[in-house]
Image (tube, rainbow, N blue to C red):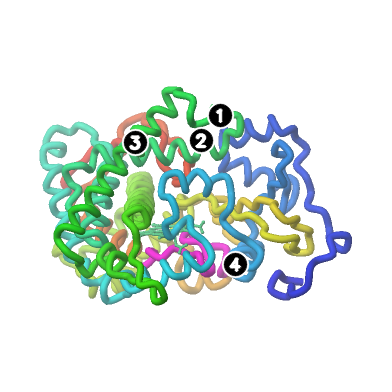
Amino acid sequence: MTTQALTAPVRPESLQQIPVVPISSVGFAKDMAGDPLTTVTRYCQEHGELVRAPAFGKFLVFSRHPDHMRDVLVRGTPRFYGKDTRGYGMMRKVVGLGLVTSEGDFWKRQRRIANPAFHRKRIEGWADMMTTATEDRLASWAGTIASGDPIDIQAEMMALTLRIVGETLLSVDVTGEAAEVGEAVGVVLGQVGYRTRTPWSMPEWVPTPRNLRFKRALETLDRVVLGIIEERRASGDGDDLLGMLMGMQDEETGERMTDLQLRDEAMTMFLAGHETTATNLTWTLYAISQHPEVERRLRAELDEVLGGRTPTVMDLGKLEYLDRVLKESLRLYPPVPMVARNALEDTELAGYHVPKDAYLILSTWSAHRHPDFWENPEAFDPDRFLPERIESVPRHAFMPFSLGQRKCIGDRFATMEAKLLLAMMVQGVRMALKDNHPIEFDANVTLRSKHGMPMVLRTP
Ligand code: HEM
């Protein structure tokens, strides 16, 4: 039976019980606070594809199986599963009710308004802006190349993608504030991840250094975003996403969006629209630096297709190896490593009983390494995405942008951006990870590198 087949209330007694991981709540919380990524893989490997963890009385379920991804995100949404989870609750403190966090009719309306901003033609119109921003960034590295000092590529990618999302969707130049915003985003996401995974953390009103840092970071982001809205109100509506949102009128009441609603949407785009792509690029550049053969093939393709010139949208279809490299990077280093949902009513998943108010953690990280579907899953092997090889992998086993109606609205934007930027960076420089630099994952909402990504740059 699949979730789609459900029309009548389930009879829990007719369903199997989800196996429980034999561990205490404290032991589980420690596992999650330590390494949430491998914890989920381990639980699923040892106790079943759908497993329940003791979590201080909460009904918490983990999965990494593509059928479950499909049944929850595609077939079960929005009827059986929603976004009323601890993590999303934390996110709402940052972005309020923007596209990522809102639900129901309000979300539907906002998504309808935002959709035109992400149409293919419109996105393609931003390619030149993206390549110009990348040229500027590459030029700014001249001194670093000459000195041989490492530069933190993670911070560089954040600044570059922040400029791009600002100029394309909101028509603002945030270059001057990039460092401040980048740091604030890091603090805010760190806090969201920490509080989501650490049930015993101090309440937010307690002035701990962590809570104070969070408050200050939020104030910084608010100041920047509200400043953008105020400026735009003064200058008139543009035809970018912010302009569309501002111009929108409720059909029945004629009301326009308030500054607070605009703030939530703009903040959402700021965060969702740059951090993820920057993370994707950072891990891709890391993977390339570790795999000389991948780098060699990528350079050969870029030379053949572009012959040293700046890429355009028309070139992207011909850069097939580049496409596979980026997909393989999204598989091995998914920028959003887990997706969480809550059960809205008693339901059934793959023959198991999922009670109302259960929380489901769908691990993209673990799904992308599932040994039943991915051969040699830990290897960085872009050719696994060759058409003849990928056709045997179930569709829902690869879900970097999530699935179903709540799938990422920016997937096309991000894909084009990542291709253009990666092509130019590989053309422009060679990167080598600083000697003996430790690589550890920091899975706070997104998959940052815990100790940054210092790279030594050379001309190719
Ligand atoms: C590699 C880059 C990106 C990745 C991996 C990514 C991943 C995701 C994922 C997994 C979700 C679903 C979260 C959930 O269902 O709980 C999502 C939603 C979303 N993403 Fe992205 N994203 C990326 C780039 C972008 C960009 C560039 C933008 C905007 C310019 C964006 C805007 C959004 C928005 C607004 C949503 C919420 C959509 C909705 O529910 O209607 N993302 N993204």
Q: Decide: marks 4, 1 in contact (CB < 8 A)? A: no
Residue 194, disc? 2
Which residue in the protein does label 3 denote? 217
- Foreground mark, 2 or 3, reads 3
Q: Decide: marks 3, 4 in contact (CB < 8 A)? A: no
- Taking 104 as reference, is 420 left or right? left
| In the image, farthest residue toward the right | 13
Residue 83, image x and y in percent?
Answer: 56, 56
- Taking 443 as reference, is 343 left or right? right
Residue 201, disc? 1
Taking depth in this image into account, of 283 and 303 the one nearest to the observer is 283
Of label 2 and label 4, which has the lower sequence position? Answer: 4
Spatial separation of the CA atoms under disc 2 and disc 3: 15 Å
Q: Decide: marks 3, 1 in contact (CB < 8 A)? A: no
Amino acid identity at mark 1? Ser
Is 291 rendered above or below residue 202? below
Taking depth in this image into account, of 216 and 450 the one nearest to the observer is 216
- The magenta segment is 395-412
Q: Looking at the image, which residue is at 22% across and 52% down?
A: 228
Taking depth in this image into account, of 82 and 237 the one nearest to the observer is 237
Residue 278, image x and y in percent?
Answer: 33, 50
